[in-house]
Image (cartoon, rainbow, N blue to C red):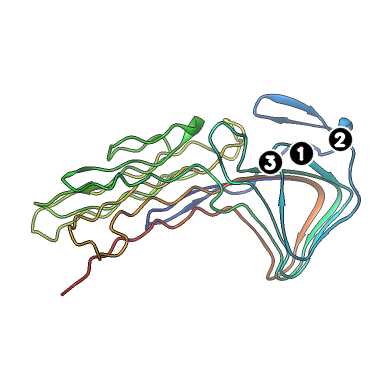
Amino acid sequence: MAFNFGGGAKNGAEKQQGGETKGHDPFDEKIIMGDLIDLGALVPMKHLVISAFMRLDCSQIHCYEAITIKDKGILTTEAYKKDKSSGILRIRCLGNVIIEKGGKIDVSELGWKGGKNNGLSADGIDVSGMSLGGKLGTCDKKPNHGGGGGGESSSKYGSSAGAGAGYGTKGDNAEDNKYSGKVNPGGLGGETYSDENLALGLVLGSGGGAGTLYSNKENDINKYPHGGHGGGALELLALEVTIEEGGGIYSNGQDGVSGSATCK
């Protein structure tokens, strides 16, 4: 049984989460990102029992005879970093994976980065979220592949938010700012780029677009809100996976930061 998960970030709108897909027999061979991996070359470690936080190295495939994740046990990996194959957790289990109540495998918020707010002190458009190939976003309301489009700072029409990221479904557009009686459109939601057949291989979730808050008050809260990071990816091949009630597998995107002005 094989599971692949990935999720896009949200900007304060909806987050996108990929679903599970069926893969090859874990005792045969698995094609990942175009590379053929011979499972016979992996030496399985003994039964892994997790009852606390545990972060596995993202640079290798981890193979075990069996895995049990107990209450308060969290299994994860490293967050995405530039020029590093991070944010993806790859596990092989020759026997059963059991996730008990209160236990979880969690790669949430480990994917491509959300748009970083430019700290605009004048009118302008902020940065879209990172997406395919680790491509950085640009100052654009349009999506960066799966990355959500950036918001716009406007002293005339009010500021608007960045958009949500796409993955298996399109990201949500940000709401328009209609406060001034005029419309300042928000960022456009990220595009889809993954499907149940994983045509692009195992990829990370994209980042949400950065929002803007036009204000010259130094004490305003979250004056320069960034976009949320995308969800990481998990590849789990096992003979059987049992998730008890209260346990789970997660690859959620991060909520974007909300900007808020001080009212007097």
Q: Which residue sits at x=15%, y=55%?
A: 158
Q: What is the three-letter code of the residue carrying label 2?
A: Leu
The local crowd at label 2, few if under 14, some if 14 to 19, many if 20 or more residues have their Cα within 10 Å, is: few
Mark 3, residue position: 58
Mark 2, residue position: 42
Query: Quick check: 34 above or below 230?
Result: above
Q: What is the three-letter code of the residue carrying label 3?
A: Cys
Q: Which residue sits at x=80%, y=47%?
A: 238
> Relative to residue 133, is residue 107 drawn left or right?
right
> Relative to residue 13, is residue 92 drawn left or right?
right
**Residue nearest the viewer, comparing 220 with 248:** 220
Image marks 1 and 2: residues in contact by CB distance under 8 Å = yes
Q: What is the three-letter code of the residue carrying label 1?
A: Ile
Mark 1: which secondary structure? Answer: loop
**x and y percent of residue 146 in the render?**
43, 39
Q: Which residue sits at x=15%, y=49%?
A: 154
Image marks 2 and 3: residues in contact by CB distance under 8 Å = no
Q: Which mark is residue 82?
A: none
| Residue placed furthest toward the front | 218
* Discs 1/3, front: 3
Number of numbered labels in the structure image: 3
Is tag 2's residue or tag 3's residue first in the polypeptide sequence? 2
- Quadrant assignment, res 58: top right
**x and y percent of residue 65 in the render?**
89, 49
**x and y percent of residue 71 in the render?**
74, 70
Disc 1 to disc 2, C-alpha distance: 8 Å
Query: Quick check: 23 above or below 93?
Result: above
| Residue placed furthest toward the bottom | 264
Mark 1, residue position: 61
